[in-house]
């Protein structure tokens, strides 16, 4: 799964690494079915191309869904309860206690015109059916496409069974080459064979055997792709001879048409036999990995018993050459992946070898070490890379946690993983999942050690993040008692830190300050520098709420996170955010604004939309306190829109909620209810990038949405193209004339005008003309 895109943008389907062959009729069918049915399930045997068709359909339909096309990959889920969690996290929803993702998703998505693609549902069919039924019942503008080996079986579902590629029929002569390539199976074979060997082509000499090969493989795309790779080092005739022998062995010499699934199994068997002994072993061992793996993981998990660590890369290259392993290139590393059908096959071979437990244990211990290292590097210049790595490894982390919970004697390793992922659970939106793992693993081990202390306080923190104060406080109490019993200074300091946050969020700054003092002393004693910086920031903020501005300022001056050369940008953004609040409370509005703007710029790199909203909240409060009620109204509107899109609120941050309520009331009183509301609502029409562009520019030079709140120029809420259209509307041109002038379709012109009316809050073209004349903001067409 990838990091959620900016909340007001549609999710983008992944880039295809190979060309799309055939299926044009099926693409049209999916589009047609979605026009009359709100749930389309694409079914078919493994390897027939269900996912590829769904992804291409999603890409082509993107413009039809203003709410976005959201792709949820479910193949790696072992726990059916994670289906709704995964959808919620992909959509960027904040998780809350007392309301499950299954309950929150329909409410959050009720009015959104979006397309949801649930890929590989067959092993979590019941949960997918329940989720789809709930969403479709309560979200009238939503459409859902699922891929599965069997239908969901709910009312309103339209099932589209995906057939294999077309093959030349039996009993006919060899068609002309041009006609032969009209069969999708033949076209795919040639396309993929040429990728492996550019010299290969279908000719009059080999056309007959190519036809037989495509028929033998029943037109199943994955089987054809595997065969195409083999054409690099053997002829089509040789492949056919080997397949014929394989079929005779299986059928006792008669070639009755096997099921299509058996055909794929035969082809995978044959591909397995083409591998060297070392490649076969590595294929089996790597099948324990979830959604891909890095070379380092493959070396740790796949080596041993006949395969040296330095040989693993060569064996992977061999598997890539045979199309068993695929490559995924990322900015920081190359990752490898087994297609799900081939991974299933590898797991069966691992069982046959009797290595399943051994290899899964190696997998568990590798990812335990990786997570411990990631936690140590979380507050460093490499945090963004660490987070991206953990996101990429999420499926592997689930595999490791599931094994630790089900294998006797391994629960302790699972506790280390689940608790060391504390920042990942919070930052990625999988708070519920983190809590479930910790609850499950804590019941499986009775050791009273520092590992348990950490698991208890991390679970307490996750419960508090879900606004479950009762459970959170109880867990912190258990952690505090056990840390005292063991003399665990680190555990005691972290319990004090988290308890301090709880007190601060619940408007008890005096108790918070005392707890942060304890945490700071403990973390200084054990030399935990990142924790010391965090304690300093929160202690300074608590003191600012107590009115001790002098000591708060002194702590901020001492905080390394506020140094310009500080490498860890997330901690620096937190320090600047807190410093902005302190400036607001002290009445230093210029310093407060500068700190919050810099904090916002840093936060954008982490895609943490709730923290971005909190930053904009404080900027709104500062503007209100400084007498700029119109700017405050716009900022409050932008923050509201972000929180609305991720279904978040300030309920768990009462100290910020109080500031919000006070300064929003001040701005409303200054502007008047009607004018404030007009500016507020107009701000919610901005898209995310436009809003951020306005906020982060010089306030003295930037305008805001046109309303009676101000006579300044509007902020750049219209795109350059829309400003061109607005200028033509002001000239009195019709949509047809605009289309001709700009060399665009009439439909596109209609769409531009509709967007302009919506963004400006107008209902008539004359209002657009008046707006252009008044503001001079629209660009003349080129």
Image: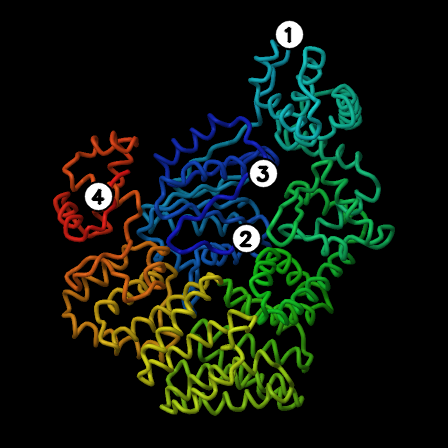
Residue at 79%, 34% (x, y): give it.
274
Tell whether label 4 touches label 2 (CB within 8 Å).
Answer: no
Number of the front mark, 2 or 4: 4
Q: Give the vertical position of 585 relative to 237 (above or below).
A: below
Q: Name the residue under label 4.
A: 726
Residue at 23%, 60% (x, y): give it.
681
Give residue 1's mark.
Answer: 2
Tell me the CA gap for discs 3 and 1: 35 Å
Q: Name the residue under label 3.
A: 17
Horizontally, is 85 left or right of 258 in the view? left
Tell me the CA gap for discs 3 and 2: 17 Å
Mark 3 or mark 2: which comes first in sequence?
Answer: 2
Specify the farthest residue to the top. 173
Tell whether label 1 touches label 4 (CB within 8 Å).
Answer: no
Quarter-of-image position of residue 587: bottom left
Give residue 173's mark.
Answer: 1
Tell me the CA gap for discs 2 and 1: 48 Å
Tell whether label 1 touches label 2 (CB within 8 Å).
Answer: no
For the residue carrying disc 2, how many other residues have a C-alpha within 10 Å: few (<14), some (14-19), or many (20+)?
some
Number of the front mark, 4 or 1: 4
Q: Give the vertical position of 151 relative to 632 (above or below).
A: above
Identify the element where label 3 is drawn. loop
Mark 3 or mark 4: which comes first in sequence?
Answer: 3
Give residue 756's mark.
Answer: none
Identify the element where label 4 is drawn. helix
Horizontally, is 110 left or right of 120 in the view? left
Tell me the CA gap for discs 2 and 4: 40 Å
Mark 2 or mark 1: which comes first in sequence?
Answer: 2
Horizontally, is 688 left or right of 749 in the view? right
């Amino acid at each position: 799964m990838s990091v959620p895109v900016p909340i007001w943008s549609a999710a983008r389907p992944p880039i295809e690494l190979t060309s799309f062959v055939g299926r044009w009729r099926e693409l049209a069918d999916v589009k047609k079915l979605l026009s009359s049915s709100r749930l389309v399930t694409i079914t078919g045997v493994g390897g027939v191309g269900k996912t590829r068709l769904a992804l291409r359909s999603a890409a082509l339909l993107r413009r039809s869904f203003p709410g976005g096309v959201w792709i949820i990959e479910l193949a790696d889920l072992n726990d059916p309860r994670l289906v709704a969690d995964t959808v919620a996290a992909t959509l960027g929803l904040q998780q809350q206690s007392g309301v499950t993702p299954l309950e929150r998703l329909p409410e959050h998505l009720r009015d959104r015109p979006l397309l949801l693609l649930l890929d590989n549902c067959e092993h979590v069919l019941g949960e997918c059916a329940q989720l789809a039924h709930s969403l479709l019942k309560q979200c009238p503008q939503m459409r859902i496409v699922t891929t599965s080996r069997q239908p969901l079986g709910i009312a309103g579902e339209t099932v589209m069974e995906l057939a294999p590629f077309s093959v030349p029929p039996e009993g006919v002569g060899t068609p002309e080459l041009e006609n032969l390539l009209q069969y999708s199976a033949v076209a795919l074979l040639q396309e993929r064979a040429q990728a492996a060997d550019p010299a290969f082509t279908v000719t009059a000499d080999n056309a007959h055997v190519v036809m037989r090969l495509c028929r033998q493989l029943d037109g199943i795309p994955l089987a054809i792709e595997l065969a195409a790779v083999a054409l690099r080092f053997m002829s089509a005739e040789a492949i056919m001879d080997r397949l014929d022998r394989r079929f005779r062995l299986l059928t006792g010499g008669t070639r009755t048409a096997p099921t299509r699934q058996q055909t794929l199994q035969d082809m995978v068997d044959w591909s397995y036999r083409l591998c060297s002994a070392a490649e076969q072993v590595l294929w089996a061992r790597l099948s324990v990995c979830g959604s891909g793996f890095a070379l380092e993981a493959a070396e740790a998990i796949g080596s041993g018993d006949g395969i040296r660590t330095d040989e693993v890369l060569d064996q992977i290259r061999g598997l890539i050459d045979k199309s068993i392993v695929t490559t995924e290139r990322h900015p920081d590393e190359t990752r490898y992946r087994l297609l799900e059908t081939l991974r299933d096959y590898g797991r069966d071979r691992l069982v046959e070898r009797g290595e399943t437990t051994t290899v899964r244990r190696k997998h568990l211990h590798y990812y335990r070490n990786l997570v411990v290292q990631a936690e140590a590097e979380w507050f460093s210049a490499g945090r963004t890379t660490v987070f991206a790595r953990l996101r990429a490894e999420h499926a592997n982390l689930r595999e490791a946690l599931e094994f630790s919970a089900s294998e006797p004697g391994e629960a302790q390793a699972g506790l280390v993983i689940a608790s060391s992922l504390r920042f990942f659970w919070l930052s990625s939106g999988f708070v519920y999942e983190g809590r479930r793992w910790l609850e499950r693993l804590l019941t499986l081990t009775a050791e009273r050690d520092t590992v348990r202390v950490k698991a208890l306080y991390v679970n307490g923190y996750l419960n508090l993040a879900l606004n479950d104060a009762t459970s959170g406080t109880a867990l912190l109490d258990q952690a505090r008692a056990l840390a005292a019993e063991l003399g665990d200074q680190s555990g005691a300091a972290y319990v004090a830190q988290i308890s301090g946050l709880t007190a601060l969020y619940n408007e008890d700054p005096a108790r918070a300050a005392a707890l942060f003092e304890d945490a700071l002393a403990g973390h200084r004693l054990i030399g935990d520098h990142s924790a010391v910086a965090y304690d300093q920031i929160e202690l300074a903020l608590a003191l600012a709420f107590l009115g001790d501005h002098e000591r708060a300022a002194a702590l901020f001056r001492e905080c390394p996170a506020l140094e310009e050369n500080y490498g860890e940008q997330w901690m620096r953004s937190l320090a600047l955010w807190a410093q902005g609040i302190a400036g607001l409370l002290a009445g230093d509005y210029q310093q407060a604004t500068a700190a919050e703007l810099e904090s916002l710029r840093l936060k954008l790199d982490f895609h943490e939309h709730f923290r971005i909203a909190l930053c904009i909240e404080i900027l709104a409060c500062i503007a209100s306190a400084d007498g700029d009620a119109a700017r405050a109204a716009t900022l409050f509107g932008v923050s509201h829109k972000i929180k609305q899109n991720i279904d978040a609120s300030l309920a768990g941050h009462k100290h910020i909620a109080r500031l919000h309520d006070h300064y929003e009331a001040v701005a409303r009183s200054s502007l008047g209810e009607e004018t404030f509301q007009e500016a507020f609502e107009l701000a919610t029409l901005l898209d995310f990038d436009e809003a951020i562009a306005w906020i982060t520019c010089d306030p003295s030079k930037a305008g805001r949405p046109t309303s009676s709140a101000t006579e300044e120029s509007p902020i750049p809420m219209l795109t350059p193209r829309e400003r061109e259209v607005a200028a033509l509307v002001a000239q009195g041109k019709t949509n047809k004339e605009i289309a001709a002038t700009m060399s665009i379709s009439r439909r596109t012109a209609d769409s531009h005008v509709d967007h302009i009316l919506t963004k400006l809050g107008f209902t008539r073209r004359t209002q657009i003309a008046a707006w252009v004349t008044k503001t001079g903001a629209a660009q003349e067409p080129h």
